[in-house]
Amino acid sequence: MVRVKDLLKSFSHACRGVRTLIKDEQSFRLQILAALVVGIFLIIFPLSVFEIIIVLLLMVLVLVLEMINSIFERLVDTFKPRIHPVVGEIKDIMAATVLIASLFAAVIGVIIFLPHFLNLLVG
Protein backbone atom coordinates (compact mmCIF):
# COMPACT_ATOMS: atom_id res chain seq x y z
CA MET A 1 0.00 0.00 0.00
CA VAL A 2 1.25 3.46 -0.89
CA ARG A 3 1.80 5.72 2.09
CA VAL A 4 1.09 9.38 1.39
CA LYS A 5 3.96 10.49 3.61
CA ASP A 6 6.47 8.38 1.63
CA LEU A 7 5.02 9.57 -1.68
CA LEU A 8 5.34 13.22 -0.64
CA LYS A 9 8.90 12.56 0.51
CA SER A 10 9.72 11.07 -2.93
CA PHE A 11 8.24 14.11 -4.68
CA SER A 12 10.26 16.35 -2.40
CA HIS A 13 13.49 14.57 -3.39
CA ALA A 14 12.57 14.82 -7.08
CA CYS A 15 11.86 18.55 -6.77
CA ARG A 16 15.19 19.02 -5.01
CA GLY A 17 16.89 17.28 -7.94
CA VAL A 18 15.20 19.62 -10.43
CA ARG A 19 16.22 22.65 -8.34
CA THR A 20 19.82 21.37 -8.33
CA LEU A 21 19.79 21.03 -12.11
CA ILE A 22 18.33 24.51 -12.59
CA LYS A 23 20.84 26.02 -10.16
CA ASP A 24 23.97 24.18 -11.33
CA GLU A 25 23.48 23.23 -14.99
CA GLN A 26 23.47 26.01 -17.59
CA SER A 27 22.59 23.55 -20.38
CA PHE A 28 19.52 22.41 -18.47
CA ARG A 29 18.41 26.01 -18.00
CA LEU A 30 18.78 26.60 -21.75
CA GLN A 31 16.81 23.44 -22.51
CA ILE A 32 14.05 24.57 -20.12
CA LEU A 33 13.95 27.96 -21.83
CA ALA A 34 13.69 26.27 -25.24
CA ALA A 35 10.91 24.03 -23.92
CA LEU A 36 9.01 27.08 -22.64
CA VAL A 37 9.29 28.80 -26.04
CA VAL A 38 8.10 25.65 -27.78
CA GLY A 39 5.29 25.39 -25.22
CA ILE A 40 4.15 28.88 -26.22
CA PHE A 41 4.19 27.79 -29.88
CA LEU A 42 2.02 24.80 -28.92
CA ILE A 43 -0.54 27.20 -27.46
CA ILE A 44 -0.41 29.70 -30.33
CA PHE A 45 -0.47 27.44 -33.37
CA PRO A 46 -3.29 25.04 -34.27
CA LEU A 47 -1.49 21.71 -34.37
CA SER A 48 -2.94 18.25 -34.76
CA VAL A 49 -3.01 15.99 -31.72
CA PHE A 50 -0.29 13.87 -33.35
CA GLU A 51 1.96 16.92 -33.83
CA ILE A 52 1.41 18.02 -30.23
CA ILE A 53 2.32 14.56 -28.96
CA ILE A 54 5.47 14.45 -31.10
CA VAL A 55 6.59 17.90 -29.91
CA LEU A 56 5.91 17.06 -26.25
CA LEU A 57 7.77 13.75 -26.54
CA LEU A 58 10.78 15.48 -28.10
CA MET A 59 10.78 18.16 -25.41
CA VAL A 60 10.78 15.51 -22.68
CA LEU A 61 13.40 13.42 -24.49
CA VAL A 62 15.85 16.32 -24.67
CA LEU A 63 15.26 17.32 -21.03
CA VAL A 64 15.65 13.75 -19.78
CA LEU A 65 18.83 13.24 -21.80
CA GLU A 66 20.19 16.49 -20.36
CA MET A 67 19.41 15.17 -16.88
CA ILE A 68 21.14 11.85 -17.63
CA ASN A 69 24.11 13.78 -19.02
CA SER A 70 24.35 15.72 -15.76
CA ILE A 71 24.23 12.49 -13.77
CA PHE A 72 27.04 10.94 -15.85
CA GLU A 73 29.15 14.08 -15.56
CA ARG A 74 28.84 14.04 -11.78
CA LEU A 75 29.59 10.32 -11.62
CA VAL A 76 32.66 10.40 -13.84
CA ASP A 77 33.94 13.59 -12.19
CA THR A 78 34.34 11.55 -9.03
CA PHE A 79 36.91 9.41 -10.88
CA LYS A 80 38.80 12.30 -12.48
CA PRO A 81 40.77 11.87 -15.73
CA ARG A 82 43.95 11.06 -13.81
CA ILE A 83 42.39 7.76 -12.76
CA HIS A 84 41.32 6.77 -16.28
CA PRO A 85 41.51 8.55 -19.66
CA VAL A 86 38.07 7.23 -20.68
CA VAL A 87 36.42 9.65 -18.23
CA GLY A 88 36.70 12.52 -20.70
CA GLU A 89 35.39 10.35 -23.51
CA ILE A 90 32.32 9.40 -21.48
CA LYS A 91 31.54 13.06 -20.87
CA ASP A 92 32.03 13.89 -24.56
CA ILE A 93 29.81 11.02 -25.69
CA MET A 94 27.01 12.03 -23.31
CA ALA A 95 27.24 15.64 -24.49
CA ALA A 96 27.09 14.40 -28.09
CA THR A 97 23.99 12.36 -27.22
CA VAL A 98 22.17 15.45 -26.00
CA LEU A 99 23.42 17.46 -28.98
CA ILE A 100 22.14 14.94 -31.52
CA ALA A 101 18.76 14.64 -29.81
CA SER A 102 18.49 18.44 -29.64
CA LEU A 103 19.38 18.88 -33.30
CA PHE A 104 16.86 16.29 -34.46
CA ALA A 105 14.22 17.78 -32.16
CA ALA A 106 14.94 21.19 -33.70
CA VAL A 107 14.67 19.80 -37.24
CA ILE A 108 11.34 18.14 -36.45
CA GLY A 109 10.20 21.35 -34.74
CA VAL A 110 11.03 23.33 -37.88
CA ILE A 111 9.13 20.83 -40.03
CA ILE A 112 6.07 21.13 -37.77
CA PHE A 113 6.14 24.87 -37.03
CA LEU A 114 7.55 26.40 -40.23
CA PRO A 115 4.28 26.20 -42.18
CA HIS A 116 2.54 28.05 -39.33
CA PHE A 117 5.19 30.77 -39.28
CA LEU A 118 5.01 31.12 -43.06
CA ASN A 119 1.24 31.35 -42.80
CA LEU A 120 1.66 34.28 -40.42
CA LEU A 121 3.98 36.06 -42.85
CA VAL A 122 1.87 35.43 -45.95
CA GLY A 123 -1.37 36.14 -44.17
Image (spheres, rainbow, N blue to C red):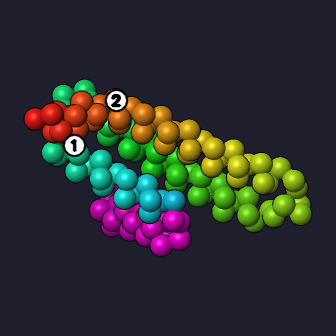
Of the pair 11 and 29, the residue shown nearer to us: 29
Q: Quick check: 66 left or right of 115? A: right
**Location of residue 20 with respect to 49 vertically, above or below:** below
Please give left or right for residue 83 compared with residue 75 in the image.
right
Give the quarter of the figure containing the C terminus.
top left
Q: Quadrant of residue 47?
A: top left
The kind of residue tagged 1 is Leu
Magenta stretch holds residue 15:
yes
The residue pinned by badge 2 equals 111
Q: Residue furthest bottom?
A: 23
Which residue is located at x 77 percent, y 48 percent? 89
In the drawing, what numbered circle is on residue 42? 1
Residue 74 belongs to magenta span: no
Tag 1: Cα neighbours inside 10 Å, few (<14), some, or many (≥20)?
some
Which span of residues is magenta-colored? Answer: 1-26
Q: Is residue 67 visible?
A: yes
Q: Residue at the spot x=48%, y=73% of the render?
A: 23
Residue type for callout 2: Ile
Q: Residue at x 30, y 47 (%)?
A: 38
Near-viewer residue (76 or 91): 91
* Mark toward the start of the polypeptide (1 vs 2): 1
